[in-house]
Image (cartoon, rainbow, N blue to C red):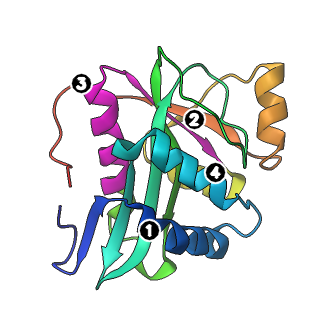
Amino acid sequence: MNTSSADTIWRVMTPDDLGPALHLAGTCYPDYPEDAAVFAERLALSPEGCFVLECRGRLAGYLFSHAWKGAVSVPLNTVLGHLPDTPDRWYIHDLALAPALRGGGHARTAIALAENQARKRGLGLLSLTAIGPALPFWLSQGFASEPACAHEQAVLALYDANARLLTRRVDQASSSASP
């Protein structure tokens, strides 16, 4: 799928993209480190939910997303082992864009890719854990905060004091975002 220019596209992630994605994660989120094993597992468990933004042949963004169940965030830097058998939502684990490409609509395209995966599975919710600095962006994208039980509050504290589990409804109509 072409985004704002012919040399910038979202495409399906491959194992060769994991190293550059991990490097970008360290650049974008130095206060929220995750091990290479976490990214590798997300790709292995949900290859259909993992994409990279390629700009002029280089990785300039990524999206890790997967099926999930319940209103509790995925703990930071945690290997899951497996995904739920009966998910009730699609979860955006991580979305990162190189600073030079922010503001160009690439994040909206990535969100649409995640929504398409939810739609394919008949899941009516899209969820994510918003870290404090990113909270205004996600709220501007139509996400709203979920009530946090005590267990969820403990998980959110692993991120930062302002982290929130956010959710938005997925329109079941088809979308045009597909790589």
Does residue 12 appear left or right of residue 17 in this picture? left
Report if the CB atoms under discs 3 and 2 are less than 8 Å apart. Answer: no
User: What span is in magenta?
Assistant: 109-130
Q: Which residue is mark 3?
A: 172
Mark number, residue 166:
2
Query: What's the residue type where badge 3 is placed?
Result: Gln
The residue at 20%/49% (across/down) is 177
Q: Element type at marker 4?
A: helix
- The kind of residue tagged 1 is Asp
Q: Amino acid at mark 4?
A: Val
- At label 2, the amino acid type is Leu
Q: Residue at x 59, y 19 (%)?
A: 70
**CB contact under 8 Å: marks 3 and 4:** no
Mark whose residue sits in front, 2 or 4: 4
* Gap between marks 2 and 4 measured at Cα: 21 Å
Q: Are marks 1 and 3 in contact (CB under 8 Å)?
A: no
Q: On the image, which quarter does residue 154 sit in?
A: top right
Marking on residue 17? 1
- Residue 126: x, y in percent? 44, 32
